[in-house]
Image (cartoon, helix red, strand yellow):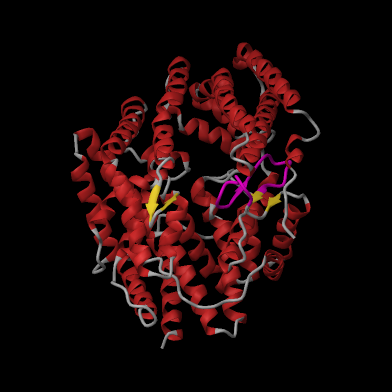
Amino acid sequence: MPDKWNLLDILSNQSTDQIEALLKKDVDQFESYKKILNSIDEKKMLEILELKERIYESMSKLENYYAMRFYENVKDSEASAKLSYLKQLHTDLSNRIMFFSLWFMKLDDNTAKKFVESKILARFKHYFERIRQLKEHTKSEEIEQIINLKNITSGSFFDVYEIMTSSFEYDFNGKKLTSEAMISKYRDIDPKIRKQAYDILLGKYREHKAELYEIYKNIVLDWTNEDLKIRNYNKSISSRNMSNDLDDSTVDAVLDVVRENSKLWHRYFQLKYKILSKKRKFPYSRCHIYAPYEVKLKSYDYDYCKKYVLETFKQFDQRFFDAANEIFKAKHVHSHPQKNKRGGAFCNIITNKHAPYVLLNHTDTIRDMFTIAHELGHGMHDMFSRVQPNLLQQPPLPIAETASVFGEMILADRILKESKNNEEKKFILMNLLDNEFATIPRQAFFVIFEKIAHENIPKGITKEELDKKYLEILKEQFGSMEIPEVFKNEWNYIPHIHETPFYCYAYAFGNLLVLSLYDMYRKQGKVFIEKYIKFLSYGGSRYPKELLAGLGIDINDKRFWQKGIQIIKEQIEQLEELSK
């Protein structure tokens, strides 16, 4: 039976008008504290933070209610209009309450320390720490308000990119296809169709390369002007690292380990090519890295997958099952495709008083079963972290993928142990390795490219020179594999590069982290589970370095990250053994 979500649960028995009225009233009250800040004690500070929590809750309810309506039906014009209105409202209200963070930043160290180390305020300690951390990169209230307003319009560079690229239509054998339909053909069984899909899709980006480069150049220059010239960060990537609660050295360690192990992926691509080319001949080319393993598997209908995933979580730990099952019981899942529904899948946190919402598009494949495990993993993370304040419930991006990918790992492990079908096992292993490639080296090398772009665009690098740099990076990733020249345009069709610079390493960090944690689980068993659940319950209330130190991990130590690489090596070896 398909699941449909109950969006009214977001509103908690209130109307949207009532929530908006409460939001504005709370912001008015928050502003009234501005006159007394320099005389407040710890109890008054707690009152202020609890009011800020309520403001967060109201804004989140409004934005998520209309966002989820829009995702359910992208032609819902009311939801679309409300989201535009709420975006402006959020900016306006944020500007009105900004004074609090700026005031706390400017406090002398001794006064700030009194609040940071207060027992009454202990749950908000990391919130204070993060504000203080931004002190040297934050300007006056007036300048910060101007930057906020500037960001509404400078953010339009990406809006133009999205409007432009989402309107692209691709002429594929006489049919007009969307980019989603084209991308699906990367996994077609026919090699000619796979190559044709890349040629047509990337060819469209080549056709519009001048306009697209102008958009990207302005995105980079806007980022550089704000972060390097105004906020005085050392490097373009540094502000992203700080927003992720990470040191530059930690991110460098992860990127270095991925880069140093490129040849392991060359080994996998050669193995996969050897396996697949026995059934169907095609060139050893970048066009075919997602070629499917042609095997007839049973249909994985939704009810079966849902039950199997929940049972898998129960085998791991009852608390995992209970957390995931509560999301279904709350009717917070939308499971199947429907007309005008957004594609893909996600898990959406609302507040610490709500079970999260999950969107799926289930089509009865084994990949869909892994998607359920992935999104429920996110959901369980949110359920465990509900003990934190709203301001600290969400983990930073690099930690956010931990529970989701871990959920996929325990699902894959169960199937590989229980299955009597070697073809199913090979399919699972190739699916795992394909996903690990897509989320670890692929994402890491995007960021390596971005670092080059952000360094050189302000110096006047041309589009042709930047394309050449990207091709060099692809050759490092794929070794002796043929890289058709059309792939020099690939970076321009990666939305994250344009919308959220340096975002992509969070995938590499998170997925490699999970593999390393899974190695610990295999060795420690139930002892690890207790520490792992505690780790998830912290949400965003600790720095990742501090969180992982609680598990006995030094995230600046390359040897830890290498343990994740070892898991990948073992998967390749297992696939090699099954393929003899």
Compared with 123, 146 (above or below) is above
Quadrant position of the C terminus in the picture: bottom left
- Residue 246 visible in rendering: yes
The residue positioned 61% from the left and 14% from the top of the image is 34
Q: Position of residue 14 (x, y in %)?
A: 79, 30
**Residue with the most extreme right position:** 13
**Looking at the rendering, which quadrant does residue 183 occupy?**
bottom left
The residue positioned 37% from the left and 63% from the top of the image is 194
**Residue with the most extreme front position:** 174
Quadrant position of the N terminus in the picture: bottom right
The residue positioned 49% from the left and 21% from the top of the image is 106
Q: Position of residue 455 (x, y in %)?
A: 25, 39
Compared with 337, 115 (above or below) is above
**Looking at the rendering, which quadrant does residue 104 occupy?**
top right
The residue positioned 26% from the left and 68% from the top of the image is 481
Q: Position of residue 217 (x, y in %)?
A: 29, 34
Count of marks, rendered view: 0
**Looking at the rendering, which quadrant does residue 321 occupy?**
bottom right
Position of residue 174 in the picture relative to residue 481 (left or right): right
Q: Is residue 349 magenta?
A: yes
- Depth check, front residue: 261 or 297: 297
- Residue 254 visible in rendering: no
- Depth check, front residue: 76 or 265: 76
Q: Position of residue 94 (x, y in %)?
A: 56, 23
- Depth check, front residue: 217 or 115: 217
Secondary structure character of the magenta stretch overall: loop
In the rendered structure, which segment of residues is drawn in magenta? 338-357
Q: Is residue 459 magenta?
A: no
Position of residue 315 in the picture relative to residue 127 (left or right): right
**Residue with the most extreme top position:** 35
